[in-house]
């Protein structure tokens, strides 16, 4: 069945209409059948009318397995009984036109109802989606707030640093470490400190607290003589330095 095929009302008591009774009386069941066949064709035609011509009646006669003369006789009888109307060279049915008009009205009402239903569904979906969007936005802000809190650096206490250094069993001088970073505003290079434990480990790895053992100056109290390159005065020299005299250098 084609998509655009429609049903039309067929009154169960249509045979009791005076006009159809007259058609049945004069042309019998065959005439009644031809009448309803033409009604169906009129519903199908785009203009809902048939051209009053021999070609039209021949086509209908073939469909009904009857003669063209019988079809034409029934059509003329229907026009006389006002079941059909002839307008120029066209044949129409008021009943068919009323059915088409009613069908278009029903179609329009259904279309409006469908649009209203779609609008309601869209509004309902929008209402359902808005809380979801608001909830997601709230969660995003909360997550950002938590992330910001995590990123805010809080300087450690001296006790915390001591405990961490004890855990690592290092030799970091906590007082010196604290004094250094408190003085520079807890900066690591040009950046604000983010992880003080990492700073402790860096301090530990770089051995900032290991005392550098500078070589001692030559022990001038020893008897090996003056520092290298220092000229030893002769025995006749006067004004001999005290350390020369003390160690009796050059006086043996």
Image (cartoon, helix red, strand yellow):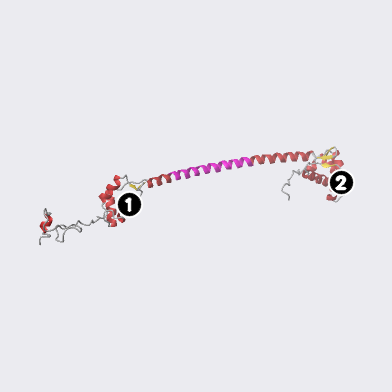
Location of residue 148 in the rendering, given as x and y in whole percent from the top left corner: 40, 45
Q: SS at mark 2?
A: helix
Q: Nearer the viewer, mark 2 or mark 1?
A: 1
Judge the density around disc 1: few (<14), some (14-19), many (≥20) Cα neighbours within 10 Å: some
Left or right: 148, with 213 as reference point: right
Q: What residue appears at the point 83 percent right and 40 percent down from the top-left corner?
A: 91
Q: What residue appears at the point 72 percent right and 39 percent down from the top-left corner?
A: 102
Asked whether the viewer can see residue 179, the reply is yes
Q: SS at mark 1?
A: helix
Q: Nearer the viewer, residue 107 or 14?
A: 107
Location of residue 59 in the rendering, given as x and y in whole percent from the top left corner: 84, 48
Disc marking residue 199: 1
Can you identify the residue that label 2 sits on? 55
Q: Which of 214 and 3 is in front in this view?
A: 214
Residue farthest along the front direction in this orientation: 236
Disc marking residue 169: none
Question: Main structural element of the magenta stretch: helix, strand or loop?
Answer: helix
> Does the magenta-highlighted stretch encompass residue 134?
yes
Asked whether the viewer can see residue 157, the reply is no
Location of residue 162 in the rendering, given as x and y in whole percent from the top left corner: 27, 52
Q: Magenta residues?
A: 114-141
Please report whichever mark, 2 or 1, sits nearer to the chain's N-terminal start.
Answer: 2
Judge the density around disc 2: few (<14), some (14-19), many (≥20) Cα neighbours within 10 Å: few
Give residue 89's quadrant in the image.
Answer: top right
Tally of marks: 2
Q: Do the residues labelled 2 and 1 touch (CB within 8 Å)?
A: no
Q: What residue appears at the point 65 percent right and 39 percent down from the top-left corner?
A: 112
Location of residue 164 in the rendering, given as x and y in whole percent from the top left corner: 29, 53
**Quarter holding the C terminus?**
bottom left
Q: Nearer the viewer, residue 151 or 142?
A: 151
Give residue 236's quadrant in the image.
Answer: bottom left
């Amino acid at each position: 069945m084609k998509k655009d095929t429609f049903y039309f009302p067929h009154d169960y008591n249509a045979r009791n209409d005076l006009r159809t009774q007259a058609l049945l009386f004069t042309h019998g069941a065959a005439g009644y059948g031809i009448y309803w066949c033409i009604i169906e064709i009129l519903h199908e035609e785009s203009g809902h009318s048939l051209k009053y011509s021999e070609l039209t009646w021949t086509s209908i006669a073939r469909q009904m397995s009857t003669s063209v003369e019988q079809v034409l006789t029934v059509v003329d009888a229907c026009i006389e009984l006002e079941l059909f109307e002839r307008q120029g060279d066209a044949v129409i049915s008021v009943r068919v036109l009323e059915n088409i008009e009613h069908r278009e009205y029903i179609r329009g009402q259904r279309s409006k109802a469908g649009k209203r239903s779609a609008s309601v569904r869209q509004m309902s979906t929008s209402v359902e989606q808005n809380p979801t969007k608001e909830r997601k936005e709230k969660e995003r802000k909360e997550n950002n707030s938590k992330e910001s809190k995590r990123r805010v650096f809080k300087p450690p206490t001296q006790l915390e640093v001591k405990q961490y250094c004890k855990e690592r069993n290092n030799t970091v001088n906590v007082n010196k470490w604290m004094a250094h970073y408190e003085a520079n505003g807890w900066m690591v290079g040009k950046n604000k400190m983010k992880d003080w434990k990492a700073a402790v480990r860096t301090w530990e790895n770089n051995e900032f607290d290991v005392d550098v053992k500078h070589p001692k100056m030559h022990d001038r109290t020893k008897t090996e003589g003056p520092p290298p390159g220092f000229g030893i005065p002769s025995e006749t020299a006067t004004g001999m330095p005290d350390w020369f005299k003390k160690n009796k250098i050059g006086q043996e």
